[in-house]
Amino acid sequence: MLVRVRYAPSPTGTLHIGGARTALFNYLFARHTQGAFILRVEDTDRARLVPGSEERMMAGLRQLGLEWDEGPDVGGPYGPYRQSERLERYREAAAALVAAGAAYRCYCTPEELEEQRRARQAQGLPPRYPGTCRALTPEDWERRRGQPYVLRLKVPGEGQTVVDDLIRGRVVFENAVLDDFVIQKADGSPLYNFAVVLDDHDMAITHVIRGEEHLSNTPKQILVARALGFALPQYAHVPMILAPDRSKLSKRHGATAVEEYLEQGILPEALVNYLLLLGWSPVEEREIWDLGEAAAAFSLDRVQKTAAVYDYKKLEWMNGQYLRRVSVARLEEALAPFLARAGVTVEPQPPLAAVVELLRERARTLPELAEQVAYFYQAPATYDPKGVRKHFADPETAARLEGLARRLEAVEPWTRAGIEAAVDAEAAERGLARAALIHPARLAVTGRTVGPGLFELLEVLGRVATVDRLRRTAGNLDAIRSQAVAAAEGGPA
Ligand code: GLU
């Protein structure tokens, strides 16, 4: 059997991490089985439609590397893949159910439905459509010609509908809790639980892999499928992603949209890897997986049954792993917008590749990295005030920086070993520990107290800039010190 799965977003916003993970699991399952991964746009609910949302979701999926085999833009043998282009099909199928006596017209007005609901509530009964219009005959319909009606499916009042879920196992629903639900609105448009069954059937979907929030829809979809005489796909409901406090993940927990993460400087590769482990536990215990490796190893029986808890720190850690791992060329490309945003103009010297190679070991996000790249191309305009009070306090500071500059001028060749020897020689001559030169030198050159090892840093920065910055700082110490004092008085620095 050829596996065919689908990701079926409603274009009501942007791609969220829950949706992205659903798409990812579908994608991996398809790749693992050499099946097809289909994108279907569920846009029948015109009121909830957000213009541009479809394009944004597609862009998000593509940024994550989740390319689909069939879909609204690439076509495929079972299209159209937009529900709005299939309305005729839904209407015909609904009409056929009515003709077969499996569905019926309901003329109840919203007021009447509200009245029925209240009456049931007063009797302590759950809110459920009582089947008022079930008994109407085609003659009654004829008499009501011109009145708006919806179509409802006849749901058996007893018995059970069983979902054999590949992740959750057997889940039993009592039909008594379902009612004759609406399959077509008064305007002739289909309801989700109806359209989705026709779509999955017509697109030859074999496995429905989707979020757990849809589990309660599944018995309805099974009833529709049975009424239409369709074979059922297999179902796999993926547990929710919860916030760290185990509540439903929402905006107040920070970013939840894929585009926001990418904006914030998370690499798509890292986000995908993070989402992979949010619910899937590989047999082989390791954290770093690219899409190809994940596809080779993926199986639904390793998807956890319990909710996954979202953890931004872990995502950041993952991003740090990818900042070290991806090629320098890839990193330069990903970094470009962040450098532009930080106002950094990259010069030919030092080469950006060397700078990035040096800094990536410590960074966790792209903006952080961009911010550090900045000091390779700009002499410091300000100096960390705390650092100044600590490392520039000694009255000998200017002489030490100057002495170091003089030695570095003569280092040949300009390598980290040569730089290290010069620092040590200067320290020995002055009877200092090397740290007493390293800290002031770093601050003088970068304006910061933290960063990569000084010798590597200077090697990449280059002789001219190093010597120039040491001298410039040495000549400016009074002003730099008073700035730091002012910062201390202005509040804790
Ligand atoms: N359109 C539904 C949603 O966005 C998905 C339906 C499904 O996967 O069956 O939640």
Image: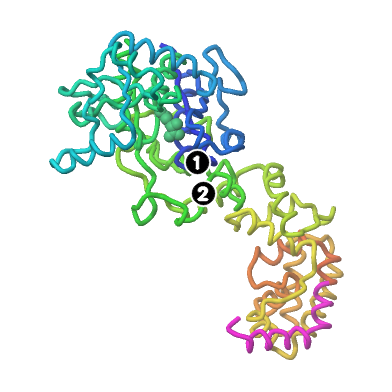
* Magenta-colored segment: predominant secondary structure: helix
Which amino acid does the dot numbered 1 rest on?
Asn
Residue designated by label 1: 273
Q: CA distance from mark 1 to mark 2?
A: 8 Å
| Label 2 within 8 A of ligand 1 by Cβ | no
Which residue type does callout 2 highlight? Met
Residue 486 or residue 459, whichever sits in front: 486
| Badge 2 element | helix
Q: Are marks 1 and 2 in contact (CB under 8 Å)?
A: yes
The residue at 41%/15% (across/down) is: 201
Percent of width and height locating residue 116: 23, 36
Which is nearer the eye, 245 or 361? 245
Residue under numbered circle 2: 318
Query: Percent position (x, y) of residue 111?
Result: 31, 37
Is any atom of residue 298 visible in this view? no
Q: Which mark is residue 58?
A: none
In the displayed structure image, the side of residue 261 where residue 164 appears, left or right? left
| Position of residue 76 measured from the top left corner of the image (x, y, whole percent) | 57, 15
Magenta region, residue range: 469-493
Asked if the stretch drawn in magenta spans residue 179, the answer is no
